[in-house]
Image: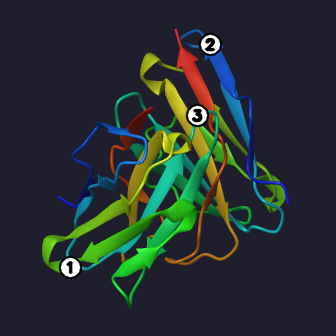
Amino acid sequence: EAGVTQFPSHSVIEKGQTVTLRCDPISGHDNLYWYRRVMGKEIKFLLHFVKESKQDESGMPNNRFLAERTGGTYSTLKVQPAELEDSGVYFCASSQVAGYTDTQYFGPGTRLTVL
Amino acid sequence: AQSVTQPDIHITVSEGASLELRCNYSYGATPYLFWYVQSPGQGLQLLLKYFSGDTLVQGIKGFEAEFKRSQSSFNLRKPSVHWSDAAEYFCAVVPVIQGAQKLVFGQGTRLTINP
């Protein structure tokens, strides 16, 4: 069974450009999460999809970030326009059941560098 | 403030030595508790989790963790480390708040193994 995959693994862009990150969850997992780790800080929650609906987007930092999950399969996270402070590692995770005890399976992350 | 604290940013131990990584949380109600590990180039992998019951939890790769309610701690242990245990370790919680299924992470502890 394939795990959570993320693309690209690394992206380097200039300030003001747009970047789109993609996450493919484990097949059959209705729940998809985005997290971010800014250098030197803890991993922080961004948002949670249940199928194609946003269940919780309380962690999205501002309106430059747009997440979508059309059809309830893969998800994209767009940053437009990118700022220096957006640099970090963006993790995606998925889980089968939405519950406190359900295991979230993580992808390897996308390292975003904004110059 | 509600938080997860991993006091040790970096720990170095010799191969074969015992290991204890510390984790403290600050929440009114006992949250659900997790330890994840991230090896270089890999996603976060769940080592173990605690919800209720026996306070000593066994995980994968020979790891265990002990929940101590009086100390609000959930320390990770391994009796004898192997070079392959070199990685970054994250303690995380899911607060028991209705509708909240996001993981809240500590800052991580990077483990280096001396041969």
Gap between marks 3 and 2 measured at Cα:
23 Å
Where's residue A63, x and y in %?
Answer: 50, 37
Where's residue A71, x and y in %?
Answer: 84, 59
* Mark 1 on the same chain as mark 2: no
Pointer 2 residue:
A13
Q: Residue at x 49, y 40 (%)?
A: B87
Where's residue B94, x and y in %?
Answer: 41, 68
Q: Which residue is drawn at 51% across and 55% down?
A: A57
Pointer 1 residue:
B69
Label 2, residues with CA under 10 Å away: few <14, some 14-19, many ≥20:
some
Q: Is mark 2 on a helix, strand or loop?
A: strand
Q: Do the CB atoms of the residues marked 3 and 2 lie less than 8 Å apart?
A: no
**In the image, B18: left or right of B38?**
left
Residue B38 visible at all: yes
Q: What residue type is labelled 1?
A: Arg
**Of B92 and A115, which appears nearest the observer?**
B92
* Mark 3 on the same chain as mark 2: no
Where's residue A52, x and y in %?
Answer: 73, 62
Identify the image quadrant of the N terminus of chain A: bottom right
Give the letter of the chain under mark 1: B
Q: Which of marks 1 and 2 is in front?
A: 1
Give the letter of the chain under mark 2: A
Quadrant of residue B41 within the rendered picture: top right
Q: What residue type is labelled 2?
A: Ile
Quadrant of residue B43 within the rendered picture: top right
Label 3, residues with CA under 10 Å away: few <14, some 14-19, many ≥20:
few
